[in-house]
Image: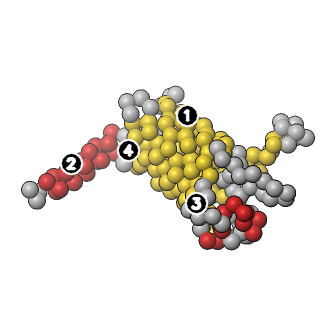
Amino acid sequence: MRHVPTIVLVLLLAAGLQSAWADSPRRVVVTTEFSIPLNPPALEGDEVLPPGAADTLSLGVGYRFWGIFNASAHLYNEIVYDADKPVGFTVRPMGLFSGGLGLEIPLGGPHLILDWQRLFTGPSAPNQGVVSYARQTKIGVSFSLTEMWRVHVFSRTIRNFSEPAQELVEYEPFLTDPQTRFATIGIGTSLRF
């Protein structure tokens, strides 16, 4: 009976190695995503939405390993709607980036996406330094259009804001409550090389 965990561990290791060897050589992933908030906070006066609570466009790069795992980093940009611009909007860096790990599990056609990222503010953020901002989780589904091109839809939740983030005066009314969370839905595409 004591050998059962060892046998299960060996089988899992064999399955993981088999999926790594059988995996497509396309391991580098370049991603872009557009997301909109489901519960944006109401603004009063001169208040500004905190990073992650507005429409965003993110650019990311990742590396797939062991078949279903993905390590990635993303840079987030805020979409500012402005009727005076020729296209009606501009894209502005919000000083937010992330890094984390995810899974892309095949479901016999589409793939289930599970992702955990740690968010950081960058030098262009109001605090003028790199500090931990929050954690985010993502769940979604991806569809293969070609061997190297995929489209995915997802839901992302940003929560567990750090103490340095809660101390930012610009966002004080939004981030001081420990239960604060921002939920977004979005669509994205990725290229695999």
- Marks 4,2: beta carbons within 8 A: no
92 lies above or below 167: above
Callout 2 crowding tier (Cα within 10 Å): few <14, some 14–19, many ≥20? few
Amino acid under disc 3:
Gln
- Marks 1,2: beta carbons within 8 A: no
Q: Nearer the viewer, residue 183 or 66?
A: 183
- Kindly report the distance in space between the C-alpha atoms of the residues bearing marks 3 and 2: 41 Å
- Kindly report the distance in space between the C-alpha atoms of the residues bearing marks 1 and 4: 19 Å
Q: Position of residue 148 (x, y in %)?
A: 51, 34
Q: Position of residue 179 (x, y in %)?
A: 58, 60
Q: Position of residue 178 (x, y in %)?
A: 59, 64
Q: Secondary structure at mark 1?
A: strand
Residue lying farthest to the left in this orientation: 1
Examine the image and state in which quarter residue 31 appears.
top right
Examine the image and state in which quarter residue 129 appears.
bottom right
The residue wearing badge 2 is 11
The residue wearing badge 3 is 179
- Kindly report the distance in space between the C-alpha atoms of the residues bearing marks 3 and 1: 32 Å
